[in-house]
Image: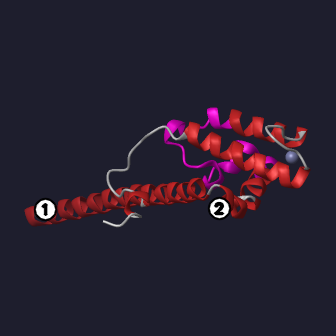
Amino acid sequence: MSIFSRFLPTRKPVEIKNNIPKEKANIRKTFGIYCHSHHKTSGDTLCPKCTALLATVMTKMNRCPYGITKPICDRCDRTVNCFGSKQAQEFLHVMGSSQKRMFLRHPIMAFKHKLASMGVDYAKYQQAKKIDDKVKAKEEASKKRAKDRKAKK
Ligand SMILES: [Zn+2]
C-alpha cells in the first residue's frame, strides 16, 4: 500500500456526506487569496466587490437544489442556473485564477478539491451507467415479450 493510496478517491460505494462546510472554507480561502493579490487587501478583509460575490455564493450554496449531495459549485453543470451568467463568470474566474496559487499555498486542500471533483465525475458516470442498464433491460424484456407473443400464435 503506497502512501498515496489514502488520497485516492474511494471507488465503491459512493459515500454521501455533507461536504458543504469544507467547500465553503475552500471557496472562502480562494477568494481571500484572489482578492489579496488582485485588489490589494489583506488579512480577513476582502474588497466590497469580492465580499458581495462571496456572500452571494454562500447564499446560493445553501439553496442548492442538490442539497448535501451537491457537486462542487465550480464544477457543477448548474452553476449558471444558480448564479446567473455574469456572477457565474466572476465566480469561475476567481476560482480558476487562484487554482495555481492554491496549489502552492494549500497543496493538500487543492489536491483534495481535485480528487473530490473526480469523485463527482465517477458518481455521475455510475449514475449514467445505471440508467443505461435499466433502459437496456427494458428493451430486452419487451423483445422477449414480443417473441413470446409470436410463439403463442
Ligand atoms: Zn477583491
- The residue tagged 2 is 103
The amino acid marked with disc number 2 is Phe
Q: Is residue 79 magenta?
A: yes
- Assign the magenta stretch its main secondary structure: helix
Figure disc tally: 2
Is residue 65 in view from this perspective? no
Q: Residue at x 37, y 50 (%)?
A: 14
- The residue tagged 1 is 148
The amino acid marked with disc number 1 is Asp
Q: Secondary structure at mark 2?
A: helix
Q: Is residue 68 above or below residue 150?
A: above
Quarter the C terminus occupies: bottom left
Percent across and percent down for residue 139 are: 29, 62
Distance from Cα at disc 1 to Cα at disc 2: 61 Å
Is 44 situated left or right of 11 in this image?
right
Is residue 126 in view from this perspective? yes
Q: Is residue 139 above or below residue 69?
A: below
> Marks 1 and 2: which is nearer the front?
2
Residue extent of the magenta highlight: 60-88
Q: Residue at x 18, y 63 (%)?
A: 144
Quarter the N terminus occupies: bottom left
